[in-house]
Amino acid sequence: MKKSAAIKNIKQLNKLMKSAKHLLIVVHTNPDPDAIASAYALQYIANKKYNLEASIGYSGNIGRAENQAMVKELNIYMKQTAKINWDKYDRIAMVDTQPGSGNNVLPDDIKCHLVLDHHPLKGKKEKADLSYIDTDLGVLATMLIEWIQAFDLDIQADLATALVYAINSETQYLKREVNKRDIDAYLHVYMRSNLRKLASIVFPALPKSYFLNVSKTLQKAKSYRNLILVHLGNTSSAEIVPEMADLLVRHERISWSLCTGRFKDRLVLSLRSRNTKAQAGKMVRGLVKSSKTVGGHDTYAGGYVDISDMKENDIIILENKMSKKYAELHNYEKPVWKPLLD
């Protein structure tokens, strides 16, 4: 196994952790399985190696049925950051996000001590005492599995199951953006996971709202050549947007999908591609004026646009401009969008 960057800086990490009393692990808003599992793993490491009390804080919601099943089946306890007393914690870690990335609610006056991420550094300088950013990884969970191995810690079944599901979800079962380290890490935890619980997470009972969202998506979706897009309008959850983008890109004639939805004061957008070298992260930054609240990888990307000060007509104009730009970025100047179900 290739040692993670953490092992090269083990003295700094030990110093940071051993002098602490309470650690708060902050994940991004509307956390996905990779963020949840990675935070769960860091919590485990903090407790087992450093005898440190650690809590996980999140904002937004956990809306996707699979993610809800993951938290319930594996007994992962997470606190809403709105209810957290920040002064209680003398160490703050950020997992799958970074200070200033626009997708978390870390207060400006709260210091971040530790960052673990597999997305590129936000800004020119690191904004934490210690940062482990490894963009070679397809999934952050790999880094945490390497830490567990390097620290020679046993791994309990629930944690192993969480990490297996995180890798499955983030990489579409090792289909997209993985390297040998990701595969080695996956094999290590898969053998230690609870397959019955894993099946319950992958195939949860689905609420009526899911089927209503699928119906709405199919009715509103439009396609042109290898592109498909849908503007859902108001949604009950931000997580609906990437879920529907994942669904649409599976169309046999489609290689790109763009999905947007309005949730609270944000226009949430999600971009997907079946091309492993698509540079979706770069493309999504071309769809919006400010790149501070969007980002991604080669085959998937997303983010949001603040629409709190916009009227209904202005939002519609923004959605139309996004559709136009989406086509232009694929060198289609005058696309004729057709309803998907025609």
Image (cartoon, helix red, strand yellow):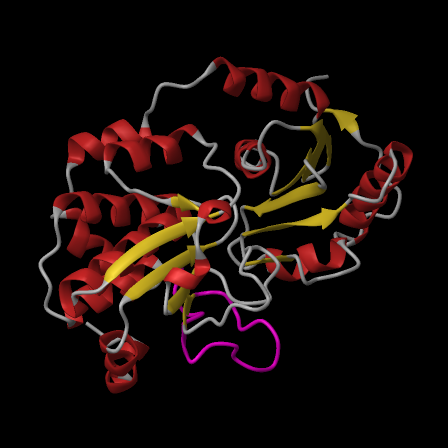
Q: Nearer the viewer, residue 14 or 22?
A: 22
Q: Position of residue 41 (x, y in %)?
A: 26, 56
Residue at point 57%, 69% (across, down): 109
Residue at point 59%, 21% (across, down): 213
Q: Nearer the viewer, residue 308 or 253?
A: 308
Residue at point 53%, 42% (across, down): 60
Count of number-bearing discs: 0
Residue at point 52%, 79% (across, down): 126
Q: Is residue 40 left or right of residue 240?
A: left
Task: Name the quadrant of the C terminus.
Answer: top right
Task: Name the quadrant of the N terminus.
Answer: bottom left
Q: Is residue 180 visible?
A: no
Q: Is residue 181 visible?
A: yes
Overall secondary structure of the magenta stretch?
loop
Q: Nearer the viewer, residue 87 or 134?
A: 87
Q: Is residue 284 left or right of residue 300?
A: right
Residue 26: name its quadrant: bottom left
Q: Position of residue 276 (x, y in %)?
A: 51, 55
On screen, residue 336 above or below 136: above
Whether residue 198 appears in magenta in the rendering, the answer is no
Residue 238: name its quadrant: top right
Which residue in the rendered view is the most extreme toward the top? 208
On screen, residue 94 above or below 20: above
Report the span colored magenta.
118-138
Q: Position of residue 243 (x, y in %)?
A: 53, 34
Whether residue 127 appears in magenta in the rendering, the answer is yes
Residue 165: name its quadrant: top left
Q: Position of residue 308 (x, y in %)?
A: 78, 43
